[in-house]
Image: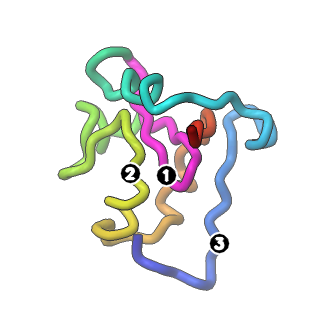
């Protein structure tokens, strides 16, 4: 994503629960939240899983060429025209399992 040094990105949860206490989800579990298989629309970015279910921009499980239900870190770091701060409007619902 485009860099903006002056405003730090601050991930948050809907309940105010610490991110470290959120559940971990596997890539397979994340893949089910693609807007097709279940009602939830989630994607991962830098190890955190964001819920974009209520975003009109992700309504069908995709946003331009980016598809929900997967880790979008590499894609967003390479292609996103906006800063990481755009994620501040979405809640973190979990952490992506690393193994």
Specify which label sits upstream in the sequence, 2 or 3.
3
Residue visible at 32% across and 66% down? 80
Horizontal and vertical percent for residue 45? 49, 52
- The local secondary structure at tag 3 comes to loop
- The local secondary structure at tag 2 comes to loop
How far apart marks 2 and 1 lie (CA) works out to 6 Å
- Considering depth in this image, is 37 or 58 the residue closer to the camera? 37
Question: Residue 59 magenta-drawn?
Answer: no
Residue range of the region highlighted in magenta in the rendering: 39-53
Mark drawn on residue 72: 2
Mark drawn on residue 57: none
Q: Quadrant of the C terminus?
A: top right
Horizontal and vertical percent for residue 54? 42, 32
The residue identified by callout 3 is 8
The reply, left or right, for residue 10 in relation to residue 86 is right
For disc 3, the neighbor class at 10 Å (few under 14, some 14 to 19, many from 20) is few
Q: Nearer the viewer, mark 3 or mark 1?
A: 1
Mark drawn on residue 45: 1
Q: Is residue 44 above or below residue 75?
A: above
How far apart marks 3 and 1 lie (CA) works out to 15 Å
Residue visible at 26% across and 49% down? 66
- Are the residues flagged by discs 3 and 1 in contact, CB closer than 8 Å? no
Q: Is residue 16 above or below residue 11?
A: above
- Considering depth in this image, is 61 or 71 the residue closer to the camera? 71
Horizontal and vertical percent for residue 82? 38, 70
Q: Quadrant of the N terminus?
A: bottom left
The quadrant holding residue 35 is top left
- Are the residues flagged by discs 2 and 1 in contact, CB closer than 8 Å? yes
Residue visible at 25% across and 40% down? 62
């Amino acid at each position: 994503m485009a860099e903006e040094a002056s405003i730090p990105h601050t991930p948050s949860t809907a309940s105010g629960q610490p991110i470290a206490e959120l559940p971990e989800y596997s890539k397979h579990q994340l893949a089910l939240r693609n807007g097709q298989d279940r009602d939830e629309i989630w994607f991962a970015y830098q190890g955190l899983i964001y819920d974009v279910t209520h975003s009109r921009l992700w309504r069908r499980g995709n946003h331009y060429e980016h598809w929900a239900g997967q880790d979008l870190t590499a894609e967003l770091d390479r292609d996103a025209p906006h800063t990481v701060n755009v994620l501040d409007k979405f809640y973190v619902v979990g952490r992506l399992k690393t193994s």
